[in-house]
Image (cartoon, helix red, strand yellow):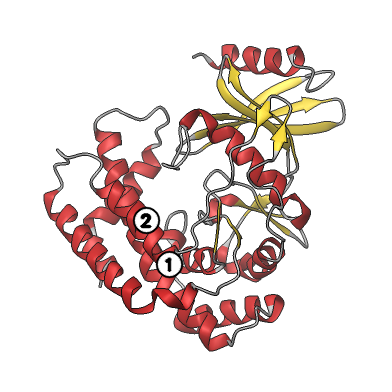
Amino acid sequence: MKEEETYRRIKEIILDRGWLETVEKVSFLAAGEYNENYVVASKDHQYVFRINHGSQLNQINPQDQIRYEFHVLQAVAPSGVTPAVFQVASDTALGGVLLMAFIEGRPFDFKRDLSTVPGIFAAIHSLPLPQKNHETSFAGGALPPLICQADPVGDIARESIGLVNRFANHPLKKEKTLLQAYHEQILTLGQTHGDLFDQEPLCIVNTEVNSGNFIIQENKGFLVDWEKAVISCRYQDLAHFIIPTTTLWKSDFRFTPDQRIHFLKQYYDLILPGVSFEALEFKTTLLEKTILLRALSWCFMAWYEYTGSQRTLTNDTTFNKIKSYLENIECFLK
């Protein structure tokens, strides 16, 4: 679809549904793997208009993806570090769309902004869980309930092996064998240590905390992409943020052992989760190993979609990173 036609349809959706009184300008903002984002100017305010093109959540109907994200954004809004969300519709000419606040700021930089992340995580992880997760509604019908991953190691392992086995004719046989073997290691890890999470208090976790999803202002940071959030243990976000497949996705940063401990201590001092720091660090380590499986399994699956022209949204930089990770998969799995 031509850019001008997309802008016209965005304006029509907003005005026809009465979401805003005026739309002065629509411009492209950014696109990820499953969503496109546009800036909408109306009077003295700016908004983000988000168009969904797919889902990473196997437990919900793809047509429910945008409403699922809307539900998450409602739930995390009291944190003060996420975008306010206003409207959602899954039946437009552009598919599933939502309207949320535009947050001014600059991109995240590991060297400058690392100390902002513990506070963002603490604000989100401290929120109470939605009281009516299975009853929440919005104009247009009930919203999908938030997915719960109370067994983070087992749940992520199942998700990961599903990605690995999604395409039976995947040509990267060596990489598939390595991922299947690593999956078995994670299952063993879960059998040995999985009960450590049995009494763990649950919270909303983003699960995709790469640097591109943070926006930084002078004295504050925001986390803005919530399409794959779930209810689980805080260690999902801590571990995902630390592992090299995350830090190297859009930068050349790797945590040193000292930086990793300092980051976790900053978070621990804010959250006071009722466990020792040693327990928090150990549980994060277990999830680092587990989430590495998910990250590489997603790259394996996405490689097939890219090479088979099965993706609605594509990005050459993303595909080059996917190829780099798979080419170096043995280094990541050491």
255 w.r.t. 100: above or below: below
Q: Which residue is mark 2?
A: 295
Q: Residue at x 34, y 59 (%)?
A: 157
- Per the image, label 1 sits on a secondary structure element best described as loop
Q: Residue at x 77, y 33 (%)?
A: 46
The reply to whether the C-beta atoms of the residues labelled 1 and 2 are less than 8 Å apart is: yes
Nearest to N terminus: mark 1 or mark 2: 1
- Per the image, label 2 sits on a secondary structure element best described as helix
Residue 243 disc label: 1
Residue 137 disc label: none
Near-viewer residue (52 or 33): 52
Q: Quadrant of residue 127?
A: bottom right
Q: Is residue 91 visible?
A: yes
Near-viewer residue (190 or 199): 199
Residue 205 x, y percent position in the rendering: 58, 58
Q: Quadrant of the C terminus?
A: bottom left
Amino acid type, residue under disc 2 in the picture: Ala
The residues bearing labels 1 and 2 have C-alpha atoms spaced at a distance of 9 Å
309 sits left or right of 103 in the view: left
Residue 17 x, y percent position in the rendering: 74, 16
Q: Residue at x 45, y 64 (%)?
A: 151
Label 1 crowd bin: few (<14), some (14–19), many (20+), radius 10 Å: many
6 sits left or right of 319 in the view: right
285 sits left or right of 279 in the view: left
Label 2 crowd bin: few (<14), some (14–19), many (20+), radius 10 Å: some
Q: Quadrant of residue 95?
A: top right
Amino acid type, residue under disc 1 in the picture: Ile
Residue 154 x, y percent position in the rendering: 37, 63
Q: Residue at x 32, y 56 (%)?
A: 296
